[in-house]
Image (tube, rainbow, N blue to C red):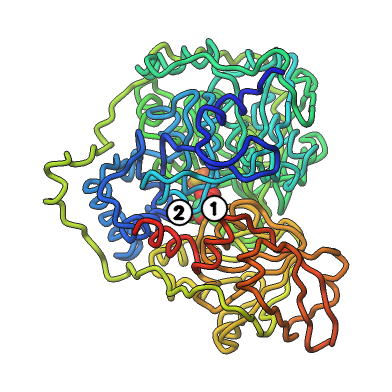
């Protein structure tokens, strides 16, 4: 029986477990990446493990999320990460060099390699045939120390592409179509593998747009084959040596099939407040808009920017619209400057931002009250833009640019078919903003620079035998990590300080939550399905840990967040009968007994006694041998320390 591409790469990297669907496997990690908003914590964790030098083939620390520097905190974090990187063998991509995923694709990614990154959009690397997975910072720290990364051996979905996109229909529309069909939880436990004749018609940046936003499916990752297009892209980056052709076997067997005829697609938008709330552009055409933001790791390649420049050429941004543009990397910005396109953008009235995440994570450019904002980004969760009632639509760069000129939501397929873009034979390569680490001989001379806002990892304790405490919060379905641990210009600078950032935990849902949880001392959170979707931020587990949350009981979890809860030593529980969700209210006192014995024995069926209501509720706690030991130890940090001894 033939193998899928995913299986081929996983097979070449498996170091623990059996190749059986649904079981836990450990894979060797070739490359890691971190960004600054998750990086400080990841490097504190790495330091706590006591490994002197990273054991990966390549580890890179990027500074891209938190670049406003409105106080000393960000700059301190940047210096801390830079110094840790230098000491421990990690390449350091300085602020200004670009968004981690864009730069990693350009400068470091390699077909057939495994990459984990402390950012959920790490699957961008799937655009050149990598198995690239988003993970919590602690998992990345362990991988840097040479430890395996554990995933559930995934189901593999074959998204078979045929045809080619019509003019002004975009790679963004491909992933919006996949989201429309599968939903934000449709990818959980799965890898999305793209195959078929249609693949050939897509350039590497287009493929990367699709794998990047595949994160919104909840998928483990997404991957494209590595083919002649990949070779040319790598060659143009001066890295042809890392090219290797890779694809699934002809007779590979997939778990699911999704067929998409690219030529039948039309421009689409993900409407507020979920990436799977899809409408065709036609239905929205004419709607007045207030803001357009172009950029982010999803759509900030040279090709995207050239399309935008083509549409803006000789035009002026509509008087009622603010247009901001953030090219994804120094390479892209530099090439736009050299070929004159930057001048076209400036001339049209675009507000050029630095090559960083910026508005995507609420670092500036929040829309006006109730404002309608078209963004080429990947997430439009409630409040993420920084304006609570902001209405964010996720669209392609071409749709965004045309709408910015017209002042209303516009369908770009109305434009004349006169845009041609040839991928450059050579990109402008200058890695002067990537600082290599100190040599092994010099590493001891490097001083770690710690600012006063950088606080240690919260206290942990081995799993208690009994949990008896109240429900501090009950929330509904599709709770995102932006609900649990919001970001934005005010809160992001606190990422290195768990006591301080925990004061904002869940405040999007309930402003009183942090105070109440602290008063209760210990508590349980109850939630609906797909709890914790979105980002990889382990702060969404560390802040609850700091606030005394002992268990989270929900209908279902998103992958990375569940792993982060286990890593933080918080018990992840799911209802056996979803209807039992209605049998618990905020304030109820819950009791779980004999936990240590049950976890150690690998029992999965537990009973929650709702003492307030006098009822018993069956729940599942699915921990395998390894995750059970992590839980017993009080989290992955303690577990790793014990195992390193
Ligand atoms: C995001 O897009 O939500 C982020 C900000 O990049 C996060 C990481 C973080 O919260 O620091 C992610 O995607 O993992
Ligand atoms: Fe940055 Fe936005 Fe991409 Fe997250 S999704 S890495 S915040 S650009």
Q: Is residue 433 above or below residue 237?
A: below
Q: Which mark is residue 137?
A: 2
Callout 2 secondary element: helix
Point 43% across, 40% down: residue: 99
Point 55% across, 17% down: residue: 246
Q: Position of residue 294 (x, y in %)?
A: 54, 39
Q: Nearer the viewer, residue 46 or 624?
A: 624
Point 70% across, 38% down: residue: 21
Point 79% across, 89% down: residue: 612
Callout 1 secondary element: loop
Q: Position of residue 479 (x, y in %)?
A: 69, 61
| Label 2, residues with CA under 10 Å away: few <14, some 14-19, many ≥20 | many
In which quarter of the view is residue 516 placed?
A: bottom right
Looking at mark 2, is its residue's CB closer than 8 Å to ligand 1?
no
In the picture, which quadrant includes the C terminus?
bottom left
Q: Position of residue 380 (x, y in %)?
A: 65, 51
- N-term-proximal mark, 1 vs 2: 2
How many numbered dots are placed on residues in this image?
2
**CB atoms of marks 1 and 2 within 8 Å:** yes
Q: Position of residue 288 (x, y in %)?
A: 71, 46
Looking at mark 1, is its residue's CB closer than 8 Å to ligand 1?
yes
Q: Nearer the viewer, residue 469 or 19?
A: 19
Q: Is residue 450 visible?
A: yes
In the picture, which quadrant includes the N terminus?
top right
Q: Which mark is residue 271?
A: none
């Amino acid at each position: 029986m033939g193998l899928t591409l995913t299986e081929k790469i996983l097979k070449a990297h498996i170091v623990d477990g059996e190749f059986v669907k649904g079981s836990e496997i450990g894979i060797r990690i070739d490359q890691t990446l971190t960004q600054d908003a998750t990086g400080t914590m990841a490097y504190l964790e790495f330091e706590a493990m006591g490994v002197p030098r990273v054991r990966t083939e390549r580890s890179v620390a990027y500074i891209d999320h938190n670049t406003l520097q409105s106080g000393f905190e960000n700059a301190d974090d940047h210096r801390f990460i830079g110094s840790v990187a230098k000491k421990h063998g990690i390449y350091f991509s300085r602020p200004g060099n670009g968004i981690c995923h864009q730069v990693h694709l350009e400068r470091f990614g390699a077909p057939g390699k495994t990459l984990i990154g402390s950012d959920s959009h790490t699957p961008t690397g799937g655009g050149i045939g990598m198995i690239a997975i988003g993970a919590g910072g602690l998992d990345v720290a362990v991988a840097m120390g040479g430890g395996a990364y554990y995933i559930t051996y995934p189901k593999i979905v074959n998204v078979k592409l045929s045809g080619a996109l019509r003019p002004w229909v975009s790679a963004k529309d491909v992933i919006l179509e996949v989201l429309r069909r599968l939903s934000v939880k449709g990818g959980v436990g799965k890898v999305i593998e793209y195959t078929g004749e249609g693949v050939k018609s897509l350039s590497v940046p287009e493929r990367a747009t699709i794998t990047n936003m595949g994160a919104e499916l909840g998928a483990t990752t997404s991957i494209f084959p590595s083919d002649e297009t990949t070779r040319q892209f790598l060659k143009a980056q001066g890295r042809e040596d890392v090219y290797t052709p890779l694809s699934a076997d002809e007779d590979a067997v997939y778990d699911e099939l999704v067929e998409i005829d690219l030529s039948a697609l039309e421009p689409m938008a993900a409407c507020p407040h979920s990436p799977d709330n899809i409408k065709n552009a036609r239905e929205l055409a004419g709607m007045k808009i207030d803001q357009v933001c172009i950029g982010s790791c999803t759509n900030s390649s040279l090709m995207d920017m050239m399309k935008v420049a083509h549409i803006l050429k000789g035009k002026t941004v509509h008087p009622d619209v603010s247009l901001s543009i953030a090219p994804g990397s120094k390479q892209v910005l530099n090439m736009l400057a050299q070929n004159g396109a930057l001048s076209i953008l400036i001339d049209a009235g675009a507000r050029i931002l630095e090559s960083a995440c910026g508005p995507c994570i609420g670092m500036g450019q929040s829309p006006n009250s109730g404002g309608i904002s078209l963004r080429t980004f990947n997430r439009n969760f409630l409040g993420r833009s920084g304006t609570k009632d902001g209405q964010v639509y996720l669209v392609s760069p071409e749709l965004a640019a045309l709408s910015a000129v017209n002042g209303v939501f516009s369908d770009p397929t109305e434009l004349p078919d006169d845009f041609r873009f040839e991928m450059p034979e050579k990109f402008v390569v200058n890695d002067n903003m990537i600082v290599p680490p100190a040599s092994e001989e010099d590493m001891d001379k490097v001083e770690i620079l710690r600012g006063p806002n950088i606080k240690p990892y919260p206290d942990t304790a081995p799993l208690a035998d009994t949990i008896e405490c109240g429900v501090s919060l009950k929330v509904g379905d599709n709770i995102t990590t932006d609900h649990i641990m919001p970001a934005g210009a005010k809160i992001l600078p606190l990422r290195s300080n768990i006591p301080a950032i925990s004061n904002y935990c869940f405040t999007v849902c309930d402003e009183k939550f942090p105070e109440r949880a602290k008063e209760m001392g210990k508590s349980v959170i109850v939630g609906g399905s797909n709890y914790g979707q979105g980002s990889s931020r382990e702060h969404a587990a560390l802040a609850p840990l700091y606030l005394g949350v002992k268990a989270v009981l929900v209908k279902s979890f998103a992958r990375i967040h569940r792993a982060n809860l286990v890593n933080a030593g918080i018990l992840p529980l799911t209802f056996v009968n979803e209807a039992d969700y209605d049998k618990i209210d905020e304030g109820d006192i819950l009791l779980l007994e004999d936990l240590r014995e049950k976890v150690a024995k690998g029992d999965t069926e537990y009973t929650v006694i709702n003492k307030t209501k006098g009822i018993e509720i069956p729940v599942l706690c699915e921990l395998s041998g390894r995750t059970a030991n992590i839980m017993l130890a009080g989290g992955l940090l303690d577990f790793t320390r014990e195992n390193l001894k």
